Image: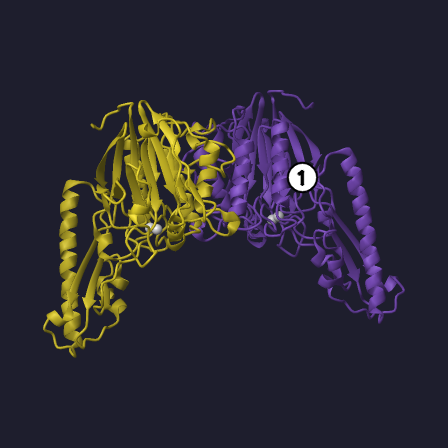
Chain colours: A yellow, B purple
């Protein structure tokens, strides 16, 4: 499939875990999440997609700051409203797809709004509905006509996932979504066979079945994840949110008989190795029941370099703290000069904002070494590194442990 | 002037101090503020006004709950968006009128929104911009295209109030607004002659000059109010927010050479006598430099009855607490039966929601009487009164003291 204006191709930009407002009080990193969100929105406009599909954790905080909420709405109003018509015809019962929507339709069918890029969103664990009227921040954006919030299960013991049925030319898309549910509970509901994925009655095999989910994919303890095999095997593609490592290339999974694309977060919210992978969004093109996904590198993401050293390999006397400090200082300096060099190269090519990098050096210190004050150590790298206070992470090797999802 | 569709008449619904979200956790009174706001919006639609002008304290809390924010936006989307065109042409430089608006225009001129009732709002002391990015809740509604937030002074020491210049047929309106500033500071800025009200250069005398302000009007201590004489004397009408007592009938004030309309709050946020006055909004009609204001009784406002007794007038022995309690019980019961009767009459006439009344009995207890537990006393009136916990207010008469503004 070519990247054309084919009226039988549904074009969807997929992204997840934008964590808007992450560290929004930080003088250096405060705008990172919004900068990248703006990049994603501008890609959506440039690629003339039919839809932007977001896989949860749009916001980092359950109650985003007023500033973050305002800036998010400002960006969405700027990029997602406009004259360009939307070609997706909606065939399903919208009162079922969007039960809490008093206005009875997706935003681009509301005559009072001009929507050029419809945004469809599920909630993640960071921005799920909470006590206050059982609303989430996404509901505010939804009532403002800026997005279409779907996939919310009202009864966790008995979940019916009803697809949004969309048509463009000869292509028909059944879009399934399930906002985050605590993994243990959802695991149990699956075991009890109380998760149903409803299918269109008429010619169900003619639909492209896309599912977006926001759960642990990695096994983080018994029942603390959702095995791929639990999901319905009629899906063509599953977009998996919540896991921050970018494995966006669709991978065929025998267990479920579908492809999985794990876009990963668009901002590093932890300084783990997985978050240091280059971050992407995906341009998904669907024609009939075939698809193709082109990954697009995000250029506004703050550079992040993760490395690891073991002090016992260094040959330094464990009692000579000064020598250890000097050794680590050189290690970090060397990562930093690599980073600076990489940035220079990138800038020569594409226009990239000159951002201070994030650096994380994990320091294995078994063998009698003593950790020291990492904040003081970091002062040397003020104005050179975006995270001077936590460059170093001292640890002792134990068993294997998977990083947390985000 | 008749209530017609005269294309030379600018029709404005004026209201203030809606205090949305006031007591929104209260099981009985939780929806009062939103119910009345919905009534106001439906009057605006019914009267086909060109504008709804709100004089501050739209929200009760600086950070409204998610529920209140959501319901407010839902109501405004329902009542203020629509196909009906707006006839107000804007002649002033909008980037000066709305400096923080990235979209460069009033909501009804934005091609991406269909606005049928433009809402113009200044902030009050309850919903003023605060620390978080120096934004207020009104900014969220503004970026959502639901209202036009104006009258914010950036430099309190040097205030320039620039009018929004609007035209409909032969009528030209200069709309001035000043969001709340701490009274002492604004008083000083006025004294320093650093408050300027700018006027249109061309034929300044052809404009109807309307000013909306949200400050103490009552003298609550030296410099803790704004004397009417401070204001520019070219105004035709001043709409004064913040004072909750309804004195909406325009009153000519020699000191300023203008009329003042004080709409008062649309919900009682304190149980003072002033808040027990019937609550109104005003239908302002302007033709040329003449105006007329018709007050409209709000029918959804919870009935509130305020009364006062002096125990020393009762002849009861100060040591006989039971007798005092019985006496007050009878007093409250008598107010309540009056209230119930009044409600019956109202219901026979116009359709009114059957609301439990608010009752406040002020009890002057000098002369050796002892106050008792008012919450326990109120238990007798659960399910009969909306505020069982604070029906009684024991006090001792001192000097004269003005109630606070709200
Ligand atoms: Mn997550
Ligand atoms: Mn996440
Ligand atoms: Mn006020
Ligand atoms: Mn008020």
Quadrant position of the N terminus of chain B in the picture: top right
Looking at this view, is B216 or A167 the one in front? A167
Looking at this view, is B4 or A53 the one in front? A53
* Residue at left offset 27%, top offset 43%: A256
User: Residue extending furthest right?
Assistant: B315
Residue A67 place in picture, x, y as percent:
41, 48
User: Residue extending furthest bottom?
Assistant: A319
Q: Chain of mark 1?
A: B
- Residue B402, can we see it? no
Judging by the rendered image, the residue that carries numbered circle 1 is B260
User: Residue extending furthest left?
Assistant: A315
In the picture provided, is B182 more to the left or to the right than B299?
left
When the figure is inspected, residue A358 is found, relative to residue B253, above or below; the finding is below
Residue A288 place in picture, x, y as percent:
28, 27
Does mark 1 have its CB less than 8 Å from ligand 3? no
Q: How many marks?
A: 1
Residue B227 place in picture, x, y as percent:
64, 48
In the picture provided, is B214 more to the left or to the right than A169?
right
* Residue at left offset 59%, top offset 33%: B209
Looking at this view, is A142 or A42 the one in front? A142
In the picture provided, is A8 more to the left or to the right than A330?
right
Residue A324 place in picture, x, y as percent:
16, 72
Element under disc 1:
strand
Looking at this view, is B368 or B225 the one in front? B368
């Amino acid at each position: 499939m070519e990247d054309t204006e084919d009226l039988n191709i549904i074009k969807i930009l997929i992204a997840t875990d934008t964590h808007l407002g992450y560290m929004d009080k930080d003088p250096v990193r405060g705008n990172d999440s919004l900068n990248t969100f703006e990049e994603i929105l501008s890609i959506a406009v440039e690629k003339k997609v039919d839809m932007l599909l977001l896989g949860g954790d749009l916001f980092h905080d359950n109650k985003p700051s007023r500033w973050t909420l305002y800036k998010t709405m400002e960006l969405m109003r700027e990029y997602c409203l406009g004259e360009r018509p939307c070609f997706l015809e909606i065939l399903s019962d919208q009162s079922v797809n969007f039960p809490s929507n008093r206005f009875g339709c997706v935003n681009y069918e509301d005559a009072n709004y001009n929507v050029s890029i419809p945004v469809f969103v599920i909630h993640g664990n960071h921005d799920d509905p909470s006590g206050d009227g059982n609303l989430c921040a996404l509901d505010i954006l939804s009532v403002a006509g800026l997005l279409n919030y779907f996939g919310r299960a009202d009864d966790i013991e008995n979940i019916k996932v009803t697809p949004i049925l969309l048509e463009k030319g000869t292509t028909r898309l059944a879009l399934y979504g399930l906002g985050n549910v605590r993994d243990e509970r959802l695991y149990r509901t699956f075991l009890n066979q109380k998760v149903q994925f409803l299918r269109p009655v008429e010619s169900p095999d003619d639909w492209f079945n896309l599912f977006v989910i926001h759960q642990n994919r990695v096994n983080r303890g018994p029942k603390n994840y959702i095995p791929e095999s639990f999901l319905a095997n009629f899906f063509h593609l599953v977009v998996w949110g919540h896991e921050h490592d970018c494995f966006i290339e669709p991978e065929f999974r025998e267990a479920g008989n579908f492809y999985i694309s794990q876009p990963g977060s668009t901002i590093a919210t932890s300084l783990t190795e997985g978050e240091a992978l280059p971050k992407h969004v995906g341009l998904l093109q669907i024609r009939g029941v075939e698809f193709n996904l082109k990954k697009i590198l995000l250029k506004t993401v703050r550079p992040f370099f993760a490395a690891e050293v073991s002090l016992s390999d260094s040959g330094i006397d464990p009692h000579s703290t000064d020598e250890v400090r000097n050794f680590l200082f050189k290690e970090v300096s060397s990562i930093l000069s690599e980073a600076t060099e990489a940035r220079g190269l990138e800038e020569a090519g594409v226009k990239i904002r000159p951002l201070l990098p994030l650096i994380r050096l994990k320091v294995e210190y078994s063998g009698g070494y003593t950790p020291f004050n990492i904040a003081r150590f970091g002062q040397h790298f003020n104005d050179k590194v975006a995270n001077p206070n936590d460059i170093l992470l001292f640890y002792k090797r134990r068993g294997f442990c998977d990083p947390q999802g985000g």
